[in-house]
Amino acid sequence: MAVNDPIRSDDTTVEEEVILSVTPAAVAMIKTLLTQRELPNHALRVFVSGGGCSGLQYGMAFEAEPRDFDTVVEVDGVRLVIDPSSLLYLQGASIDFVDSLMGGGFRIDNPNAVSSCGCGNSFRTNDSADSSSGGCSSCSH
């Protein structure tokens, strides 16, 4: 399910800009984790930080309250919070939960990434300073 932010381009037209899409499988898993950890009123923070084998990496953590300037996205009763810096990298991304024999977990499909590590947790954008990415010990490039 996509969450949209209305963007006014002129006085007569309102365009919808997708902030973040979250699949039903991801929503279900977030709800399950919140219940298991007894955190019913928490939100899932989705963020990007420096590091990883491709220069940037994704992170997620539960938090009780959004911080000042956070963008709050609500999908089917689940709240996600994104800080302004991370939003620059996550705009238009989609979060899914995949459960397979080879290992499951949250997967982020990010249209802003020009390359990513085989582990799927690290990525690079056109704006990344280092265009040469090294290897990741937890994945196979």
Image (cartoon, helix red, strand yellow):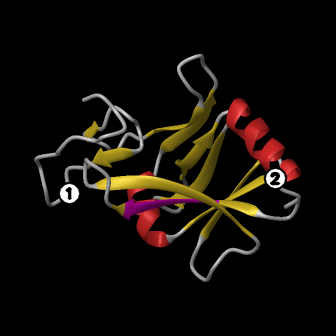
Spot occupied by residue 77 in the image (x, y as percentages of width and height): 83, 50
Dominant secondary-structure state across the stretch colored magenta: strand
Dot placed on the residue nearer the N-terminal end, 2 or 1: 2
| Residue drawn where x is 68% and y is 74% of the image | 66
Q: Tell me: residue 136, above or below residue 85.
A: above
User: Which residue in the structure is indicated by mark 2?
Assistant: 34
User: Disc number at residue 114?
Assistant: none
Residue drawn 25% across the image and 48% down it = 54
Image coords of residue 84 (percent x, y): 47, 71
Query: Helix or strand or loop: what does disc 2 sit on?
Result: helix
Q: Amino acid at mark 1?
A: Ser
Which residue type does callout 2 highlight?
Leu
What is the magenta range? 45-49
Q: Give the Cα separation between the discs numbered 2 and 1.
A: 34 Å
Whether residue 76 is visible here, answered yes or no, is no
Q: Which residue is mark 1?
A: 128
Camera sees residue 88 = yes
Residue 115 point in image, percent of width and height: 25, 38
Q: Residue lying furthest bottom in this view? A: 68
Q: Is residue 6 above or below residue 2?
A: below
